[in-house]
């Protein structure tokens, strides 16, 4: 029967219903996310068969391999792993991640990725996924660290927070007090050094060292730790720029004072990687270190884990300051160093995001919520120095993250300290800007010249301020200001 004749003989009511259903189906299709999700198959409305996705991870080969293994083991799904070096990742327009679904990257790259339109927005449905369990996440991992403005664009695998670790037995024997300011930190370091000089053997001398985390050629974080406590801004956060004008604070009194503290420490403190600094205090090669502790051998059963001898290691917050510079009044104010818990974000952590061009948005989002879940994130503990606890349940089970090097009391203190830092209103953002590496390079050059005695602190930081202003103008003040403000949740 001809189609036209058949349609003409359909009852008018049925024809109308057919037409309405067709219109609704078409309009529904128009409202769908333009990124296809048709690679997912639902069986009996329950079981979801995940399609193969591609994950790019910057460095961190061991971490990537474990994620790949867990995805296969726990979800019975395939994952193509792409290891990207830091230099490849930071190339023009991030070409190395053009064909991936999910990316894991250092948190300091978030603003550049946003500026290049590489990150997909994560809607409210994602945030409310049961597997993500957002109510268990610590405060920083639901706020600006993972957001651009009001939208989530990432989940965090942790943002390590440095603390001060010290040998309680050594401090007690020599009547040393735990330093609560950066000036006192230098004084204690020099006292320890003098005690070490009086020891008879090289091993005994090394016990009295002070070691601080540092990445070669990168003084940004060492300066930020010191300058942070000296800030007092209207928004109760510490920053490199004025959030209203993008005028750099780098040559201001707070940074000058922070640089003076760093310069004072340079001759009496040894600098090494976060992992090496922690090992130094565990292996009797230091009495005081600034770093973050982490499990030495992930997933090793306590019965198979033998310490050389029990260590009395104390844990304290980073040193603070007895005064803060009030930029609104342009003067110094007295301050209590005990209330100086500054949260550092965008320096050492790792984020995971869905690539904006993925054709498997549904699977990619589910992978992200699975990756950030309590179960999976705990299994990844210790596989990288750039991971850290992100959940309240992580702090309740902090031994997974610390192993068995620290006494139970020290572990309890560390978990409590991380909880306090997570709830602190004082934040120091890194450089949440497009092409942040250029800003960091200018500052590192200036600090190196100061420490080498080639430039005064004031002249070097003023040169940095001028260079930063010039680069901000070249890359668009408006663009950089929007990125910077969004890192604080400001419109």
Image (cartoon, helix red, strand yellow):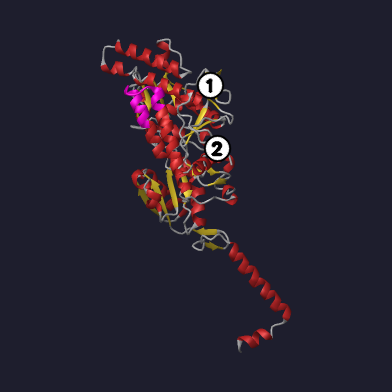
**Residue 419 position in % (x across, y down):** 54, 30
Asked if residue 289 shows in the view, the reply is: no
Kindly identify which residue carries mark 1: 324
Going 34% across and 27% down the picture, which residue do you hit?
A: 448
For the C terminus, which image quadrant?
top right
Q: Residues within 10 Å of mark 1 (few under 14, many from 20)?
A: many
Q: Residues within 10 Å of mark 2 (few under 14, many from 20)?
A: many
353 shown above or below 344? below
Asked if residue 183 shows in the view, the reply is: yes
What span is colored magenta in the figure? 444-461
**Residue 250 position in % (x across, y down):** 45, 29
Specify the principal SS of the magenta part.
helix
Going 53% across and 23% down the picture, which residue do you hit?
A: 340
Going 34% across and 29% down the picture, which residue do you hit?
A: 276
**Disc 2 secondary structure class:** loop
Task: Locate residue 25 relative to residue 96 in the image: left or right.
Answer: right
Mark 2–mark 1 Cα distance, whole angstroms, equals 21 Å
Which residue lies most toward the bottom here?
Answer: 1
Q: Nearer the viewer, residue 467 or 188?
A: 467
């Amino acid at each position: 029967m001809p189609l036209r004749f058949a349609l003409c003989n359909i009852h008018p009511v049925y024809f109308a219903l057919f037409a309405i259903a067709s219109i609704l189906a078409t309009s529904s299709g128009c409202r769908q996310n333009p990124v296809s999700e048709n690679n997912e198959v639902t069986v009996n409305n329950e079981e979801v068969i995940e399609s193969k996705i591609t994950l790019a991870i910057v460095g961190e080969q061991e971490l990537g391999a474990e994620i790949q293994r867990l995805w296969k083991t726990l979800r019975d799904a395939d994952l193509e792993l792409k290891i990207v070096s830091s230099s490849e990742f930071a190339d023009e327009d991030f070409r190395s991640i053009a064909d991936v679904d999910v990316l894991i990257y250092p948190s300091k790259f978030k603003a550049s990725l946003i500026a290049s339109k590489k990150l997909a927005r994560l809607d409210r449905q994602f945030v409310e996924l049961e597997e993500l369990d957002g109510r268990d996440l610590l405060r920083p991992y639901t706020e600006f660290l993972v957001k651009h403005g009001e939208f989530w664009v990432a989940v965090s695998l942790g943002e390590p927070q440095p603390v001060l670790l010290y040998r309680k037995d050594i401090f007690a024997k020599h009547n040393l007090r735990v330093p609560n300011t950066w000036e006192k930190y230098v004084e204690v370091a020099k006292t320890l050094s003098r005690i070490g000089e009086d020891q008879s053997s090289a091993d005994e001398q090394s016990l009295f060292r002070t070691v601080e985390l540092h990445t070669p050629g990168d003084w940004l974080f060492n300066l930020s730790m010191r300058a942070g406590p000296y800030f007092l801004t209207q928004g109760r956060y510490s920053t490199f720029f004025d959030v209203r004008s993008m005028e750099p604070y780098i040559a201001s009194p707070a940074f000058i004072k922070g640089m003076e503290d760093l310069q004072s420490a340079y001759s009496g403190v040894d600098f090494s990687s976060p992992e090496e600094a922690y090992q130094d205090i565990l292996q009797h090669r230091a009495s005081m270190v600034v770093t973050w502790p982490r499990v030495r051998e992930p997933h090793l059963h306590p019965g198979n884990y033998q310490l050389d001898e029990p260590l009395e290691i104390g844990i304290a917050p980073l040193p603070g300051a007895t005064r803060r510079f009030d930029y609104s009044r342009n003067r110094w104010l007295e301050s209590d160093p005990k209330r100086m818990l500054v949260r550092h974000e965008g320096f050492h952590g790792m984020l995971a995001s869905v690539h904006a061009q993925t054709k498997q948005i549904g699977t990619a989002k589910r992978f992200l919520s699975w990756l950030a879940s309590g179960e999976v994130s705990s299994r990844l503990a210790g596989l990288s120095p750039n991971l850290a606890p992100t959940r309240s349940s992580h702090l309740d089970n902090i031994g997974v993250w610390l192993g068995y090097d620290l006494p139970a009391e020290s572990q309890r203190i560390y978990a409590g300290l991380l909880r306090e830092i997570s709830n602190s209103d004082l934040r120091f953002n890194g450089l949440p800007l497009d092409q942040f590496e250029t800003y960091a390079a200018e500052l590192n050059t200036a600090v190196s010249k100061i420490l080498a005695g080639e430039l005064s602190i004031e002249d070097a930081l003023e040169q940095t301020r001028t260079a930063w202003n010039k680069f901000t103008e070249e890359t668009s003040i408006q663009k950089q200001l929007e990125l910077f403000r969004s890192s604080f949740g400001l419109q």
